[in-house]
Image: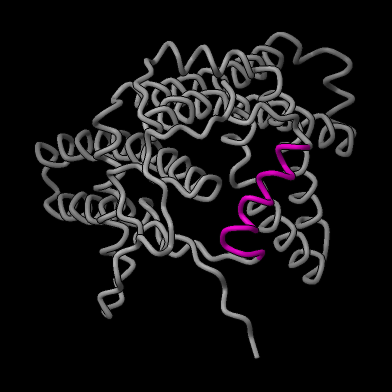
C-alpha cells in the first residue's frame, strides 16, 4: 500500500485554523476531548479493535511458550551436565538468560508492530475517505511482515543495548543512555506508519520518520497530552473504588468487585492502546500531508505535541 495524497481528507492550512479563544485548554480536558474525537474515528472502523486484542492474545501466547520451554528444560534436564555448568558459572547463566530475554523481546515487539500495522492501514484509509476491512489491514501487515521483523530486531537491539549501558554505567552513563533512548523514541515515533504507508526500507523509514517529526514540531518536542492521560485517570478511580471494597472485609463484595476491576482494566487497556494507535496515525497524516480527519479539531492536534521552549 503506497502513500498517496488523497483528496478525501481536508488539508490543514494555518490560515484555516479557527482563531484562538484566548483561554488555554487544560491537559486533562484536552486529553478527554482527544479521546472522544479518537473514539469517533474508532466507531467508524470498529474492526481495528481486533488488531489490539489479537496483539495482546498473541503476546500472552508468546510469553507462555517461552515460560513453558524454560520449565520443560528445567524439569527434564535438571540433572544434565550442562545444567550443572550453568549453576556453577554465573556469567554463562547470565549470558544465556540475557539471550533468551532478547529473543522474547524481539518476538513481543514484532507481534506488537505487526498488528499496529493493521491499525495504521485502516485508519489512514479512513482519513483519506476509504473504508477498508480487517482483512485488508491484515493483508497489508502480512505484505510488510519481513520489514516489520527486521525493524523489531533493530529496535530490540537498540533497546537492549541502551538498557545494558544504563545498568552497567554510573550516573553520567545512565543519563546519557536515557537521553539516547528518548532521542531514539522521537526519531522513530512515526516508524510504523512510514514503513507501511511509504513502503520504504528500514534505514530510509528511520530518516523519514525523524524528518517528519523535525519538520513539523522541531527537533526537541514534548508530548503535551494524549489519550493515555484520560485513561490513566479512569484506571486510578477504578483502583481507588476497588480499594474501598477491601475495607468492607466482605468477600461477597470483594470477589465480584475484584472480577469487575480486572475486566475493567483489561478492556480499558485495549481501548486505550487502540485509540493511541489511531492518534499516532492522525498525527502522522497531519505531520506528513497537513491533513486531518473531519472528526478531529485542528487546534487540539496542534496542541498535542509542541516545541520545547529554548532556554535563554
Locate residue 147 relative to residue 309 in the image: left or right.
Answer: right
Image coords of residue 32 (percent x, y): 26, 56
Image coords of residue 182 (percent x, y): 66, 58
- Residue at the bottom extreme of this rendering: 312
Locate residue 138 relative to residue 88 in the image: left or right.
Answer: left
**Residue at image point 89% right, 39% down:** 91
Q: Nearer the viewer, residue 203 or 108?
A: 203
**Residue at image point 69% right, 44% down:** 208
Callout count? 0
Which quarter of the figure has residue 302? bottom left
Image coords of residue 154 (percent x, y): 76, 35
Q: Magenta stretch: dominant SS?
A: helix
**Residue at image point 37% right, 33% down:** 8
Locate residue 124 relative to residue 35 in the image: left or right.
Answer: right
**Residue at image point 21% right, 49% down:** 242
Locate residue 254 relative to residue 66 in the image: left or right.
Answer: left
Which quarter of the figure has residue 194? top right
Q: Is residue 104 magenta?
A: no
Q: Nearer the viewer, residue 256 or 108?
A: 108
Image coords of residue 239 (percent x, y): 26, 52
Q: Report the span colored magenta.
A: 204-219
Quadrant of the rendering where the N terminus is positioned: top right
Quadrant of the rendering where the C terminus is positioned: bottom right
Q: Is residue 214 magenta?
A: yes
Which color scheme did the rendering employ for the protein? one colour
201 shown above or below 187: above
Amino acid at each position: 500500500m503506497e502513500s498517496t495524497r488523497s483528496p478525501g481528507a481536508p488539508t490543514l492550512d494555518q490560515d484555516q485554523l479557527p482563531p484562538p479563544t484566548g483561554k488555554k485548554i487544560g491537559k486533562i480536558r484536552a486529553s478527554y476531548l482527544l479521546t472522544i474525537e479518537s473514539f469517533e474515528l474508532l466507531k467508524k472502523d470498529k474492526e481495528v479493535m481486533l488488531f489490539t486484542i489479537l496483539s495482546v492474545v498473541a503476546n500472552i501466547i508468546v510469553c507462555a511458550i517461552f515460560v513453558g520451554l524454560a520449565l520443560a528444560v528445567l524439569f527434564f534436564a535438571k540433572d544434565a551436565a550442562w545444567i550443572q555448568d550453568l549453576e556453577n558459572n554465573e556469567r554463562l547463566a547470565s549470558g544465556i538468560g540475557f539471550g533468551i530475554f532478547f529473543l522474547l523481546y524481539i518476538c513481543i515487539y514484532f507481534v506488537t508492530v505487526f498488528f499496529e500495522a493493521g491499525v495504521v492501514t485502516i485508519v489512514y484509509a479512513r482519513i483519506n475517505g476509504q473504508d477498508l476491512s480487517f482483512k485488508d489491514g491484515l493483508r497489508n501487515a502480512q505484505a510488510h511482515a519481513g520489514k516489520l521483523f527486521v525493524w523489531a530486531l533493530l529496535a530490540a537491539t537498540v533497546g537492549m543495548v541502551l538498557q545494558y549501558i544504563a545498568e552497567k554505567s554510573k550516573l553520567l552513563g545512565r543519563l546519557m543512555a536515557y537521553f539516547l533512548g528518548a532521542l531514539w523514541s522521537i526519531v522513530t515515533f512515526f516508524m510504523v506508519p512510514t514503513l507501511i504507508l511509504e513502503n520504504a526500507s528500514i534505514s530510509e523509514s528511520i530518516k523519514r520518520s525523524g524528518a517528519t517529526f523535525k519538520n513539523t514540531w522541531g527537533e526537541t518536542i514534548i508530548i503535551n497530552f494524549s489519550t493515555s492521560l484520560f485513561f490513566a485517570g479512569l484506571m486510578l478511580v477504578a483502583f481507588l473504588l476497588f480499594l474501598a471494597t477491601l475495607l468492607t472485609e466482605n468477600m461477597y463484595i470483594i470477589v465480584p468487585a475484584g472480577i469487575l476491576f480486572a475486566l475493567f482494566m483489561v478492556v480499558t487497556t485495549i481501548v486505550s492502546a487502540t485509540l493511541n494507535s489511531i492518534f499516532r496515525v492522525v498525527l502522522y497524516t497531519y505531520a506528513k500531508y497537513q491533513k486531518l480527519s473531519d472528526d478531529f479539531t485542528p487546534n487540539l492536534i496542534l496542541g498535542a505535541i509542541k516545541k520545547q521552549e529554548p532556554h535563554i
